[in-house]
Image (cartoon, rainbow, N blue to C red):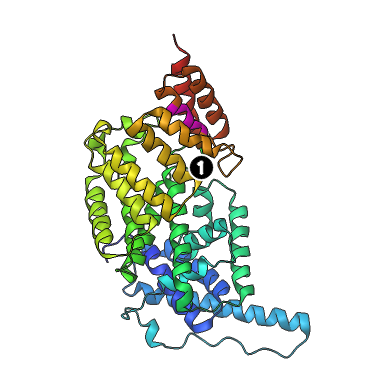
Amino acid sequence: MTARPEDLLRELAPQVLGALARRYGHFDLCEDAVQEALLAAAVQWPGEGVPGNPRGWLITVASRRLTDALRAESARRQRETAAALEPSAPPLAPDPADDPGTDRDDTLTLLFLCCHPELSAPSQVALTLRAVGGLTTAQIARAFLVPEATMAQRISRAKQRIKATGSSFTLPAPGERATRLGAVLHVMYLIFNEGYTASSGPDLHRAELTTEAIRLVRSVRKLLPGDGEVAGLLALMLLTDARRPARTRPDGALVPLAEQDRSRWEKPFITEGIKLVTDALSSAPLGPYQVQAAIAAVHAEAASAADTDWAQVVALYEVLGRLAPGPMVTLNHAVAVAMARGPKAGLDLLAGLDDGGQLDGHHRLDAVRAHLLELDGQHEAARASYLLAARRTTSLPEQRYLQDRAGRLSQP
């Protein structure tokens, strides 16, 4: 084994959870047992070494924890109801599917379960990172800047909600899979976005989230190699994350796309991302993630901001607006139109977002308006919009950047 123990544990987490869930069917208790096994491995393996059969080791430890939990649950019910003693849980019987050499992967089944439509998006994200990503509750809480107790409650409620729905550890019916896969991809998209531009706190990036999101999408792509939207999402993440080394200065200050040193972009990510989206566009039905990846590819292929093919970006946003209309699409479309046809044309598009819709009070709308007003020479109005955007964001790097832009416009 050449993988680091922590990487190996993340890879094995869904496999071990799948083995237990198939055997017992108690997803909530199985997930707790697997977490305990992962914690035991994290403590023991660095000192004792990774066992020769790490998957089997984790299954054995987790099954013991689960058996104890099921017996405790049986005893609790007996005390509360004075009913007859329920049969204690049998040991984990040998199962061909649990053979460490078996090439069975339950990642997709787990993702469908963690992204159950009865759960809120924050609960889907948290449960996915824990059950499929193998992250501890403490790691997830740190990534989202919330107390560990708050995250633990969120995960616990999510598991109880899944239990209440009576969902079994099986893939959704064929007629539901496209919709449910869309929810899975959206959750991974949310995880990536939170890591790429943190919604709050002192840091612009949370690399542990972008890295995990890319890893999760790669695992889904292995299972669904012909799905164009899975390929499109992976391409989008790679092409976007390629810019990360150039997005901040040494002091953590934000560097906008137009000012980034493109020589610092991750070339292997760009090469892989462009190939993925090119292949997907030529072989699969068109979808929103593919179009977004194509837009990112146009930026990646431009030697400088001035060389960007803005006309092509505008055309792609028009396609995206038909496939997946929404205020954020309109917002980004307005920027592209402004760069291709002038700031006044972009400002005209923004006017349609000032109607109390989803972006009302959102700092990104104010920030984009400020940028376009600045390009149009309306410096006082731009300064006011920059300051308003700075007051509305909870990201400290974004706040500092917006205040700096406003300060430059106030100088004679």
Residue 381 seen in this snapshot: yes
Query: Magenta span: helix, strand or loop, mainly?
Result: helix
Q: Is residue 34 above or below residue 7?
A: below
> In the drawing, does residue 259 fall left or right of residue 334?
left
In front of the other: 403 or 91: 403
Q: Secondary structure at mark 1?
A: loop
The residue type indicated by label 1 comes to Ser
Membership of 371 in magenta stretch: yes
Position of the N terminus by quadrant = bottom left
Residue identified by numbered label 1:
199
Residue 289 placement (x, y as % from top left): 37, 55
Residue 66 placement (x, y as % from top left): 54, 77
Residue under the image location 61 percent in, 58 percent down: 154
In front of the other: 240 or 136: 240
In front of the other: 197 or 387: 387
Residue under the image location 59 percent in, 64 percent down: 158
Residue under the image location 75 percent in, 81 percent down: 79
Q: Is residue 361 above or below residue 140?
A: above
Q: Which residues are magenta?
A: 366-372
Residue 330 placement (x, y as % from top left): 46, 43
